[in-house]
C-alpha cells in the first residue's frame, strides 16, 4: 500500500479548517511527500484527523477539503456527493437549466456542473478535480443518466493549478447548441461560447422577478449579456427595452434571444460601456420604469474593494436619476469581497446624491441551486436590492 500522505496544520490554524475547506500554504506546518493533485489526509497540530482533500503545492490555496469524515475519496464518495447535490435541486435537476454541482457549496470544491436541457457542462477548477474527472463523469452518469458532457475548464484556474484546461465533448458529442426554458422564456446556449458555462444561472430567479414588474414599463437592462433580463421583461409586457452590453459576442446572443422570444422589435441593443451610456442617457433626459444593473464583479480581490465601491456608487447614482417615480431598480453585486452592508451603504449614498427616495422592496441573492454554506461566507456572493422609487 502507498504511504499515507499527511498534511499537518500549524497550531492555531486548525480551528477554521474544521468547517472551512480552504487550506493556504501559510496554514501548513508540514506535509509528507505527495504527488500534486492527489489526496492528503489533513491533521491538526496535535495529529488528530481534520479531513481529507486534494493537495497541490503550486497555488497559494494548496489544499481544499472534500470531507471532514474519515472516508476514502473514491468512486463511491463521488457518487454519494453528486447524488446529494442532485437531490438538493429536486425536480429542477432533471429539466431546463440548473446548476447541479457548485463546488465548495456541495462538498466538491473545484467542480462545477451545469445542466442545460439534455447536456451537462462540467468545469474542473483544481488539478485534483481534473485528475478525478473520469470518476466524476461516471458518478454523474449514475445519478442523472448518460447525457452528453461538454468539458469547459476555465483558463485562469487551470494555469494557476498547472493543468491543461479541457474544452470540448468528453465522449460522444451532443448538440452544438440548445434552447432552455426559464419560466416560459427561451434562452439559447452554445456550448463552448459565451461567459460562465453559457448562462448566468445564478440570476434565473431574479430575471423572473424582473419580468413580473415589467408590465407597461420602459426597461433598461444594463450589463445585459444575452439579454436575459430584457427577454423576461418584454415577455412580461414591457413597452420597450434598451440593452447595454460591451461584448460583441454577448450582443449576438442577445439578438438571437430577443428574436426567439418574438420581442426583438420592442428592443434596442446598444454596444457601449455602461458608464458612458448611462451618462449619455441622462443628458438626453431619458426615463425608465424598470432598470437592471447587473455588472461583472468590480472587485476581484480585497485590494480592489475601494475602487469597486466607487464604481457601484457611480452606476447606481446614474440609474437612480433615470428612474421614473414608482419605477423599480434591481441592482446587484456579484463579488464576494463586497459585503452586503457596504453595498447597501453605497446604494444609500447614491440615493442621497440623486435626491431619490427609494423603498427596499426585497433583498435579493443568488438562485437556490447556488446554495450557501454558513461557515463558508464566500458561497454567498451575489447580493442585490429591489428598490422602488416613491
Ligand atoms: N444580466 C446578465 C448577466 C450580466 S454579466 C444575465 O442575466 O444574463 C455582466 C455583463 O456585463 C457581461 O456580459 C459583460 O460583457 C458586460 N460588461 C462588463 N463590463 C461592461 C461595461 N463597462 N459596459 C458594458 N457591458 C459590460
Image (cartoon, rainbow, N blue to C red):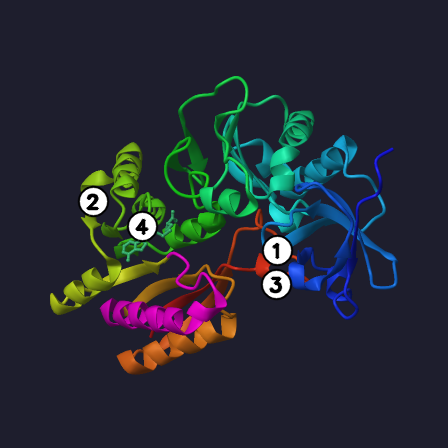
Q: Quadrant of residue 235?
A: top left
Instruction: Please state which of the two labelled residues, at mark 1 or mark 2, is closer to the viewer.
Output: 1
Q: Residue 45 appears at what percent x and percent y?
A: 83, 64
Q: Earlier in the sequence, mark 1 or mark 2?
A: 1
Can you identify the residue that label 3 sits on? 377
Considering every residue shown, the one lying at the far top of the view is 172
Element assignment for label 4: loop
Quarter holding the N terminus is top right
How far apart are the two marked residues, 1 and 3, measured between alpha carbons? Answer: 16 Å
Instruction: Please state which of the two labelled residues, at mark 3 or mark 2, is closer to the viewer.
Output: 3
Q: Residue 335 appears at what percent x and percent y?
A: 47, 61
Establish whether ligand 1 lies closer than 8 Å to the Cβ of label 4: yes
Element assignment for label 1: strand
- Closer-to-camera residue (271/57): 57
How far apart are the two marked residues, 3 and 4, measured between alpha carbons? Answer: 27 Å
- Horizontal placement of 311 versus 70: left or right? left
Can you identify the residue that label 4 sits on? 224
Q: Residue at x 51, y 25 (%)?
A: 118
How far apart are the two marked residues, 1 and 4, measured between alpha carbons? Answer: 33 Å
Q: Earlier in the sequence, mark 1 or mark 3?
A: 1
Quarter holding the C terminus is bottom left
Instruction: Please state which of the two labelled residues, at mark 1 or mark 3, is closer to the viewer.
Output: 1
Can you identify the residue that label 1 sits on? 61
Can you identify the residue that label 2 sits on? 266
- Horizontal placement of 337 versus 376: left or right? left
- Closer-to-camera residue (74/197): 74
Q: Magenta segment, which residues? A: 296-324
Amino acid at each position: 500500500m502507498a504511504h499515507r500522505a499527511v498534511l499537518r496544520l500549524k497550531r492555531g490554524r486548525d480551528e477554521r479548517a474544521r468547517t472551512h475547506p480552504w487550506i493556504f500554504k501559510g496554514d501548513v506546518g508540514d506535509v509528507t511527500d505527495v504527488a500534486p493533485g492527489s489526496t492528503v489526509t489533513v491533521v491538526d497540530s496535535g495529529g488528530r484527523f481534520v479531513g481529507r482533500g486534494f493537495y497541490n503545492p503550486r497555488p497559494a490555496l494548496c489544499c481544499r477539503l472534500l470531507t471532514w469524515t474519515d472516508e476514502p475519496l473514491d468512486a463511491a464518495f463521488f457518487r454519494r456527493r453528486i447524488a446529494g447535490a442532485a437531490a438538493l435541486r429536486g425536480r429542477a435537476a432533471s429539466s431546463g437549466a440548473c446548476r447541479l454541482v457548485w463546488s465548495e457549496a456541495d462538498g466538491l470544491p473545484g467542480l462545477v456542473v451545469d445542466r442545460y436541457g439534455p447536456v451537462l457542462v462540467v468545469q474542473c477548477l483544481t488539478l485534483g478535480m481534473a485528475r478525478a474527472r473520469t470518476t466524476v463523469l461516471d458518478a454523474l452518469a449514475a445519478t442523472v443518466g448518460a447525457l452528453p458532457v461538454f468539458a469547459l475548464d476555465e483558463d485562469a484556474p487551470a494555469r494557476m493549478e498547472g493543468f491543461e484546461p479541457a474544452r470540448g465533448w468528453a465522449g460522444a458529442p451532443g448538440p452544438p447548441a440548445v434552447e432552455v426554458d426559464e419560466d416560459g422564456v427561451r434562452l439559447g446556449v452554445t456550448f463552448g461560447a459565451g461567459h460562465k458555462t453559457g448562462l448566468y444561472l445564478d440570476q434565473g430567479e431574479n430575471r423572473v422577478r424582473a419580468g413580473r414588474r415589467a408590465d407597461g414599463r420602459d426597461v433598461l437592462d444594463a450589463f445585459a449579456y444575452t439579454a436575459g433580463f430584457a427577454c423576461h421583461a418584454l415577455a412580461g409586457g414591457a413597452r420597450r427595452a434598451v440593452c447595454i452590453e460591451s461584448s460583441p459576442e454577448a450582443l449576438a446572443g442577445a439578438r438571437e434571444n430577443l428574436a426567439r422570444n418574438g420581442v426583438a422589435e420592442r428592443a434596442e441593443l446598444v454596444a457601449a460601456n455602461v458608464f458612458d451610456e448611462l451618462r449619455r442617457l441622462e443628458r438626453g433626459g431619458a426615463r425608465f420604469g424598470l432598470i437592471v444593473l447587473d455588472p461583472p464583479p468590480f472587485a476581484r480581490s480585497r485590494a480592489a474593494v475601494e475602487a469597486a465601491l466607487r464604481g457601484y456608487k457611480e452606476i447606481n447614482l446614474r440609474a437612480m436619476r433615470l428612474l421614473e417615480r414608482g419605477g423599480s431598480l434591481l441592482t446587484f453585486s456579484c463579488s464576494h469581497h463586497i459585503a452586503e452592508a457596504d453595498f447597501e451603504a453605497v446604494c444609500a449614498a447614491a440615493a442621497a446624491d440623486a435626491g431619490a427616495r427609494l423603498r427596499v422592496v426585497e433583498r435579493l441573492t443568488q438562485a437556490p441551486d447556488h446554495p450557501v454554506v454558513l461557515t463558508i461566507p464566500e458561497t454567498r456572493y451575489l447580493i442585490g436590492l429591489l428598490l422602488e422609487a416613491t
